[in-house]
Amino acid sequence: MQIPQAKFNIGQVVRHKHFGFRGVIFEVDFEYALDEAWYQEACKALHNIGQPSIEKQQPFYHILTDGSEHESYVSEQNLEYANTDQPVQHKGIDRWFSVDYSGEYKPRFSIN
C-alpha cells in the first residue's frame, strides 16, 4: 500500500489556482473526507469555469480563508504556493497558530 504524501504543510499560505483566494492550511486529509453533496457542488463549480473534476484520491486541505470568516476545503490539484508575505486575515488564526517574528504560522497544537 502506498502511503499518501501532502505537497503542502500545516501553517503554509496557499492560493486557489482558479478562484484566486488564499489562506493558511490548518488541517490535511490524505483523501476526500466530506459528504458527496459537497463533492458534487465543488466539481460543478470547477466544470463551470472549464476545469476538470476533482480526484478524491489526493490530499485535501482545510484552509482559513483570507479576508473571510469562512474555512475552505480544497484539493491539492487546485492549490499553489502563495507568493506573498502579506498576513492572512481570519478570526481563527489565533486559535490555530502563533505567528513568529518572520511571519510564519506555527501550529499551537502538536501534530501526530
Image (cartoon, rainbow, N blue to C red):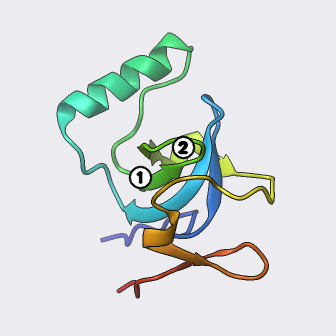
Marks 2 & 1, CB-CB < 8 Å contact:
yes
> With 105 as the anchor, is 59 left or right in this view?
left
Q: Quadrant of the N terminus?
A: bottom left
Is the residue 109 above or below the residue 4 in the image? below
Is the residue marked by circle 2 packed among few (<14), some (14-19), or many (20+) residues within 10 Å? some
Question: Picture quarter containing residue 49?
Answer: top right
Residue for point 45% across, 44% down: 69
Q: Return the x and y of residue 101 as percentages of the image width and height.
A: 76, 82
Identify the residue position indicated by label 1 in the image.
58
Q: Which residue is mark 2?
A: 77
Examine the rendered structure and indicate whether residue 20 appears above or below residue 81.
above
Label 2: which secondary element: helix
User: Residue 85 appears at what percent x and percent y?
Assistant: 80, 60
Of callouts 2 and 1, which one flags the residue occurring earlier in the amino acid sequence? 1
Amino acid tagged 2: Gln
Alpha carbon separation for disc pair 2 and 1: 8 Å
Q: Is residue 103 left or right of residue 40?
A: right
Three-letter residue code for mark 1: Gln
In this rendering, the count of numbered labels is 2
Quarter of the C terminus within the rendering: bottom left
* Residue toward you, 85 or 112: 85
Q: In screen coordinates, is 2 left or right of 38?
A: right
Residue found 25% across the figure and 51% down from its top: 33
User: 98 above or below 2?
Assistant: below
- Counting from the top left corner in percent of width and height, residue 92 is at 45, 60
Residue at screen point 53% across, 53% down: 90
Q: Quadrant of residue 72?
A: top left
**Badge 1 element:** loop
Return the residue nearer the eye: 5 or 41.
41
Residue 21 placed where, x, y %? 62, 38
Numbered tag placed on residue 10 in the rendering: none
Residue at 66% of width from left, 48% of height from top?
A: 80
